[in-house]
Image (cartoon, rainbow, N blue to C red):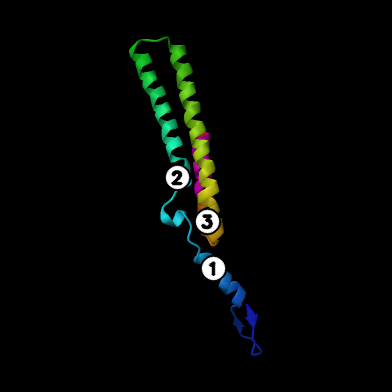
Amino acid sequence: MTTTEAGAETPDATTDAATHAAADVVTDHDRGVHGYHQQKAEHLKRLRRIEGQIRGLQRMVDEDVYCIDILTQVSASTKALQSFALQLLEEHLRHCVADAALKGGTEIDAKVEEATRAIGRLLRT
């Protein structure tokens, strides 16, 4: 803010310009492009592999495989999903949260809170 001779405060031109410039920034996120977009094919391949592990578990139960062997496969499937989730979270932080930080304003707080809740859900599993 700048103060005039009469004592009235007027918006500072640099602050006002910076605020409008941040609001005018158009990013991939505005276009509906998510953080995982560039690795989409790799993610789908990974999820298909995990899906195959789950079907393998169904087969093991159907074939009356020993409990401990099934539990070993459950553990491997769980770890694979957790690894996928962590990669997706990292991409979210690098893309969506960084995008909100670039724009400024209150959107960054919302994105950080959203990511924190997601991390909390991951930790409970």
Count up the numbered dots: 3
From mark 3 to mark 1, how far is it between C-alphas? 14 Å
Residue 27 screen position, x and y as percent: 48, 57
Q: Residue at x 39, y 10 (%)?
A: 65
- Disc nearest the viewer among 2 and 1: 2
Dot 1 surroundings within 10 Å: few (below 14), some, or many (20 or more)? few
Residue highlighted by disc 1? 21
Q: Main secondary structure of the magenta part?
A: helix
Q: Earlier in the sequence, mark 3 or mark 1?
A: 1
Task: Establish if 57 lies above or below 92.
Answer: above
Residue highlighted by disc 3? 100
Residue 12 screen position, x and y as percent: 61, 77
Residue highlighted by disc 2? 37
Q: Residue at x 43, y 15 (%)?
A: 70
In which quadrant is the N terminus drawn?
A: bottom right
Q: Residue at x 51, y 58 (%)?
A: 107
Residue 99 screen position, x and y as percent: 52, 55
Residue 122 screen position, x and y as percent: 50, 36
Quadrant housing residue 5: bottom right
Q: Earlier in the sequence, mark 2 or mark 1?
A: 1
Viewer-proximal residue, 57 or 8? 57
